[in-house]
Structure formats: C-alpha cells, structure tokens
Image (spheres, rainbow, N blue to C red):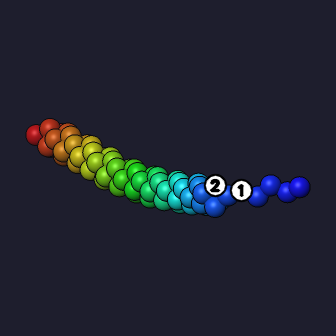
Amino acid sequence: MVLLPDLDSAGEIATSVQAVVTNEEAIVTYAQAVVTSAQAIVTYAQVIVTYAGAIVSNDEAMVTNGKAMVTNGEVTVKHV
C-alpha cells in the first residue's frame, strides 16, 4: 500500500522548497554584494597606493630640491 501525502502536506512541501530557493537566491545576491564590496575595497586600496606613490614622489622631489639648494649654497660659499 502506497501512502500519498494529502494536498495540504504537498502544498507545505512546495512552499518549503520555494523558501529554500529564495534563501539560496538571497545568499547568491549577498555573495555578489560582498564581491562588489571587495572590488570597491581593492579599487580604494589602489587609489591609496597611487596617492601614497604621489606623496613619495613629491617627497623625493623635495629632497632633490633640498640637495640642489645645499649644493648651490656650497657653491656660493666657495665663490665667496
């Protein structure tokens, strides 16, 4: 003898399956949001690195300029 679920039970199973699918879709959407957020963080980090590189370059230019001023000063002192 085969026992078949009644209609109410079958409806509950279908609703449960739909809930699982919806939950999985929500997880996938959340995962995509996390990936997008991670990409934004990577982009932000790249901007920081680029900005830091500009600061270092500026500092190097200042150091070079400082050396030039010192050299100029030494030349002036020798000239005097």
The quadrant in which residue 37 appears is: bottom left
Q: Which residue is mark 1?
A: 5
Q: Are marks 2 and 1 in contact (CB under 8 Å)?
A: yes
Residue beneath disc 2: 9
For the residue pair 38 and 13, the one nearer the viewer reads as 13
Label 1, secondary structure: give it. loop
Rendered residue at 27%/45% (across/down) = 59
How many neighbours does mark 2 have within 10 angstroms: few (below 14), some (14-19), or many (20 or more)?
few
Q: Residue placed at 18% from the left, 45% from the top?
A: 69
Along the viewing direction, whichever of 78 and 44 lies nearer the viewer = 44
Please tell me how crowded label 1 is: few (under 14), some (14-19), or many (20+) other residues with Cα within 10 Å: few
User: From what the image shows, is residue 78 above or below residue 65?
Assistant: above
Q: Position of residue 49 (x, y in %)?
A: 38, 50
Query: Which type of secondary structure does the marked residue at label 2 adopt?
Result: helix
Counting from the top left corner in percent of width and height, residue 8 is at 60, 57
Q: CA distance from mark 2 to mark 1?
A: 6 Å
